[in-house]
Amino acid sequence: MYKRILVPVDGSETCEKALASALQLAKESQGRVHLVHVLDELAYLTGYEYSADLLQVARDFAQKVLVDAADKARAAGVPADTKLMELPGGRLGELIAGEARNWDADLVVVGTHGRRGVSRVLLGSGAEQVLRLSPVPVLAVRSSEPA
């Protein structure tokens, strides 16, 4: 079964559902989770003097997301480690796929909002990128309702 499960987390309700599923799988297989949060620095750089402040707030939030996820893993009795990854203008799917290879993951568990139509085209789909590029199986956990 799956012993090394990579879980991208962002603090959203959908990712919380994915994390719960990953923790259940890891507990049943006596596995472990690798919790990653991807920070896109370019999204916070505005050219104004407050850009550095915004980036620090984003880093602080990212660390909190990782700590909260690790606390949930610990409460579930699942070994976990965390990693903050920075994405300077790259593609989320490529970064997660690379981390899955580097960490030797057996499975990636992602949350997906299940967007369709125009909202999917405009907002993109990080989960779809991961599905297409991952070197290992991917479990996509949907939010309760398609967006």
Image: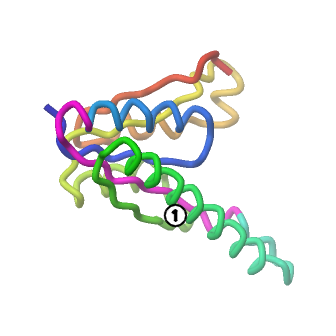
**Relative depth, front residue between 115 and 71:** 71
Residue sitting at the far top: 145
| Residue drawn at 64 percent across, 16 percent down | 145
| Residue drawn at 64 percent across, 30 percent down | 121
What colour scheme governs how the chains and residues are painted in the rendered image of this protein?
A: rainbow
In x, y percent, where is residue 25? 28, 31
In the picture, the quarter occupied by the C terminus is top right
Classify 4 as above or below 84.
above
In x, y percent, where is residue 43? 69, 62
**Relative depth, front residue between 143 and 51:** 143
Tally of numbered tags: 1
Q: Give the magenta part as a residue range.
A: 27-43
Q: Secondary structure at mark 1?
A: loop
In x, y percent, where is residue 66? 50, 58
Q: Is residue 32 magenta?
A: yes
Q: Is residue 35 magenta?
A: yes
Q: Hey, which quadrant is residue 1 in on the image?
A: top left
| Residue drawn at 62 percent across, 69 percent down | 59
Mark 1 = which residue? Answer: 87
The residue type indicated by label 1 comes to Leu
In x, y percent, where is residue 58? 68, 66
Q: Hey, which quadrant is residue 27 in on the image?
A: top left
